C-alpha cells in the first residue's frame, strides 16, 4: 500500500490597471504526491536529514520538526523559501513515484454563474469567480477525489490536509472508495503533507517564472527535470455536479481524523494566536506520534476526542476539562509546559 498526500493552494494571475492589481485568472491548484511503495520510511529519513542541513544552510531562526512553506517564507523570505523547498524535493525525488496536479477551468465569460444548494436549502446561482474562490478551502479533498477517479484499483493510503467544505458528491464518492486520513495542520506535523504543501508552492512559482499559462503540458514542463512522473487533471463543467456543494451542511470529518489527535486547550487563547515554542512543540509531538494537531473548542470539538488522543491544557478551566475527559477516555494529559519538555529532544 502506497501513501498519497494531498494539499491545495491558489493559482492567481493579475494585471496592473491604473496602479491597481486586477485579477485576470484564478483557480484553486491541488497537488498530490505519491510515494514509491516500500519507500515511506526512506522518505521520512531523507526529509529529516535534509531538514537538519537546510535549517543550518538557510539560517532558519525557528527550529521545527516539520516545515510548512508559509512558515519558511515568513522567516527567510520567498526567494530563500523557494530554494529550500526545491532542494527538499530534489533530495526526496528518488522516493517519489509521481506528482499529481489538478485545477479548475470555468471561464467566467462562458459560465457566468454556478448553481449550488438545492438539498434541504434553496438552490442559488453564485458568480463563477466567487465559486472558484470558495473551492480553495475544499480543494485538498477534491484533488484526492480527482486522483481517485483514475486510480480506483490501487490500494493507496490517502493523507489529506485539513479542509472546510459543505457537502459535495465528490466527498461522498471519495469516502465510498477510500478511508482518507485528515490532518489538521498537516503541513506542520506530517512529512508527506509538508512536502505536498511545498510542491504546491513551487508549482505556482515555477509557472510564474517561466511565464507559463496553467495547462497540463506546462505543468509537466516545469517538473520535467525531476525523477518522477507528472500527472495532471483539469476539472471543468463536466464535473460541476461533483464539486458543487448541494447542501449548506458542513462535512464532518471526525471519523477520518489522523490519530492520535493532539488537542490544545489553551484557555482564552486560540491556537491561531499561539506562536513560537508552544505551537512548534505541539506540532513536533504530533509528528512523533504520527497524528495531527488541533486547537480545542469545547462547543465543536468534544465529540472528536477518541481513546489514545493527547489533551494539552493551559489554565484552570482547561485543566478541569482535561480531568473530565480523562474520566471518559483513555487519554494522555499534558500541560503546555510538560509538552514543551517532552518535545525538546525531537529536534535533534
Image (spheres, rainbow, N blue to C red):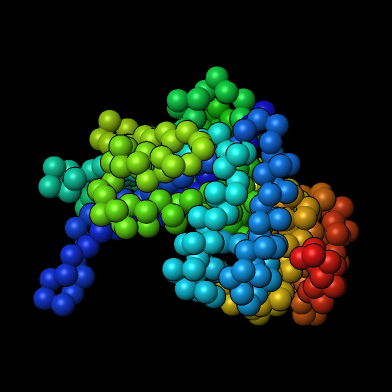
Relative to 226, say whether 82 is above or below: below
In x, y percent, where is residue 204?
37, 54
User: Which residue shows up at 61% across the image and 74% down it?
Assistant: 59
Q: Which of 87 and 18 is in front in this view?
A: 87
Relative to 341, say whether 127 is above or below: above
In x, y percent, where is residue 108?
17, 48
In x, y percent, where is residue 247?
40, 44
User: Which residue shows up at 69% across the image and 36% down it?
Assistant: 39
**Which part of the image, by quadrant, shows the C terminus?**
bottom right
In x, y percent, where is residue 37?
65, 30
**Count of numbered marks:** 0
Relative to 231, say whether 263 is above or below: below
Q: Nearer the viewer, residue 206 or 64?
A: 206
**Does residue 180 appear in this view?**
no
User: Which residue shows up at 45% across the image and 27% down it?
Assistant: 149
Along the horizontal axis of the image, is 305 left or right of 163? Answer: right
Picture quadrant of residue 299: bottom right
Amino acid at each position: 500500500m502506497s501513501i498519497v498526500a494531498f494539499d491545495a493552494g491558489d493559482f492567481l494571475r493579475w494585471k496592473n490597471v491604473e496602479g491597481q492589481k486586477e485579477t485576470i485568472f484564478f483557480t484553486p491548484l491541488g497537488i498530490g504526491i505519491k510515494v514509491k511503495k516500500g519507500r515511506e520510511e526512506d522518505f521520512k529519513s531523507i526529509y529529516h536529514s535534509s531538514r537538519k542541513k537546510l535549517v543550518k544552510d538557510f539560517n532558519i531562526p525557528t527550529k521545527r520538526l516539520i516545515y510548512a512553506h508559509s512558515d519558511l517564507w515568513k522567516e527567510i523570505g520567498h526567494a530563500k523559501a523557494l530554494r529550500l523547498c526545491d532542494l527538499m524535493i530534489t533530495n526526496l525525488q528518488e522516493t517519489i513515484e509521481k506528482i499529481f496536479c489538478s485545477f479548475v477551468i470555468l471561464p467566467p465569460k462562458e459560465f457566468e454563474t454556478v448553481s449550488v444548494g438545492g438539498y434541504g436549502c434553496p438552490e442559488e446561482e453564485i458568480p463563477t469567480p466567487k465559486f472558484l474562490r470558495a473551492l480553495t478551502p475544499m480543494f485538498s479533498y477534491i484533488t484526492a477525489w480527482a486522483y481517485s477517479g483514475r486510480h480506483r484499483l490501487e490500494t493507496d493510503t490517502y493523507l489529506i490536509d485539513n479542509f472546510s467544505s459543505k457537502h459535495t458528491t465528490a466527498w461522498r464518492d471519495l469516502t465510498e472508495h477510500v478511508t482518507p486520513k485528515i490532518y489538521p495542520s498537516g503541513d506542520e506535523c506530517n512529512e508527506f503533507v509538508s512536502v505536498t504543501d511545498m510542491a504546491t508552492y513551487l508549482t505556482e512559482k515555477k509557472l510564474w517564472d517561466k511565464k507559463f499559462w496553467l495547462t497540463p503540458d506546462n505543468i509537466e514542463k516545469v517538473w520535467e527535470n525531476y525523477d518522477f512522473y507528472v500527472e495532471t487533471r483539469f476539472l471543468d463543467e463536466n464535473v460541476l455536479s461533483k464539486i458543487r456543494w448541494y447542501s449548506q451542511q458542513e462535512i464532518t470529518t471526525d471519523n477520518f481524523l489522523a490519530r492520535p489527535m493532539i488537542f490544545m486547550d489553551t484557555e482564552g487563547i486560540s491556537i491561531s494566536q499561539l506562536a513560537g515554542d508552544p505551537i512548534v512543540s505541539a506540532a513536533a509531538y504530533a509528528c512523533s506520534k504520527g497524528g495531527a494537531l488541533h486547537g480545542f473548542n469545547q462547543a465543536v470539538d468534544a465529540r472528536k476526542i477518541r481513546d489514545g488522543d493527547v489533551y494539552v491544557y493551559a489554565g484552570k478551566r482547561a485543566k478541569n476539562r482535561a480531568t473530565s475527559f480523562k474520566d471518559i477516555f483513555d487519554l494522555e494529559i499534558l500541560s503546555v509546559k510538560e509538552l514543551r519538555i517532552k518535545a525538546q529532544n525531537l529536534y535533534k
